[in-house]
Image (cartoon, rainbow, N blue to C red):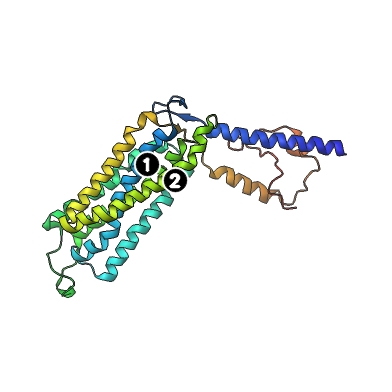
Amino acid sequence: MEKGNKESKKWVQEEVSNEINNRELAEEESVDWRGRPSNPSKHGGMRAALFVLGLQAFEIMGIAAVGNNLITYVINEMHFPLSKAANIVTNFVGTIFIFSFVELSVCSLSPLLLNYCYLTLYCHVPSQGFILLSVQAHLSQLKPPKCNPLINQSSCEEAKGFKAIIFFTALYLVALGSGCVKPNMIAHGADQFSHQSHPKQSKRLSSYFNAAYFAFSIGELIALSLLVWIQTHSGMDVGFGVSAAAMTMGLISLVSGTTYFRNKRPRRSIFPPIAQVVVAAILKRKLASPSDPKMLNGGHRVTSDVVHSSTLPYTPRLRSY
């Protein structure tokens, strides 16, 4: 009996070890920009991550400058009441994070493209929104007539019709692009350090997140000081133009690192394996567990690649008894 338990325990340990190894191998499938297997000595590492950090700094620079000074523009130029202006700003910020969640869910459900492809696709969107905001702020024909809402709000004409459509279209183009860039940006930078055969790159992953927060802080600092000063002294049209230029510089930074990036191949959605576990647990909740794990699955030894297998391997974890 004791000998049988030892054999069962050894078999379970082998299965768990195989499961971990298979997952690590799946995670390390990466390619270069031409779709060829990546070379750890040429692709990835801090050198490649610097280009992503540049994108992160420029992206937050453009977004933060607009978000923190947007309510002034909405009240003074668009002539929205204070309560409505506050809702516009909070809705704008909230929409950015909603789009981040939606983009993350879409990529998880149907991962068709590389993170790099998503980044280059979405980086154009906020730039277009900034340019449209800059054009509207510059042309008086696209804004309500000038007045001072602080003196007499009732005499100021609120932006309506075509003028409001232009404003909200531009604003939510910025929210869409920024929201979709954020999750892919962080993931793409982290992908440069996850090569298990090069421990130095793996150890530098924590350094990358420190550098990412530093890039975020530098972008915020420049946005809340220099860019807000430009908006105040040179006008919102120039300020929106600078934000568009910052986003363009971020895209240039990303594209400049194309030949240095290691890109993970798109994998199957993470949700079917999760649903597989839930369904199997519900359907088999009343079954008695055999004393020997070898008796599971008809006595056949199953592969531990859960993603590509229709049969779930046995593991001793997450037991409820």
Q: Is residue 180 visible?
A: no
State which mark lies toward you, 1 or 2.
Answer: 2
Q: Residue at x 23, y 67 (%)?
A: 80
In the picture provided, is 10 more to the left or to the right than 94? right
Q: Name the residue nearer the viewer: 149 or 312.
A: 149
Q: Residue at x 15, y 55 (%)?
A: 234
Q: Name the residue nearer the viewer: 314 or 51.
A: 51
Residue behind mark 1: 53
Instruction: Please name the amino acid that badge 1 sits on.
Output: Leu
Q: Is 45 located above or below residue 65 in the figure?
A: above
Q: Few, some or many C-alpha atoms within 10 Å of disc 2 (few <14, some 14-19, many ≥20)?
A: few
Q: Residue 151: where, in percent of width, then height? A: 16, 74
In the picture provided, is 12 more to the left or to the right than 116? right
Q: Residue 298: where, in percent of width, then height? A: 75, 36
Instruction: Please name the amino acid that badge 2 sits on.
Output: Asn
Q: Residue 266: where, in percent of width, then height? A: 47, 35
Residue behind mark 2: 210
Q: Is 309 located above or below residue 58 in the figure?
A: above
Q: Is residue 112 visible?
A: yes
In the picture provided, is 251 more to the left or to the right than 238? right
Q: Residue at x 30, y 41 (%)?
A: 250
The quadrant in which residue 295 appears is top right
In the picture provided, is 180 more to the left or to the right than 199? left
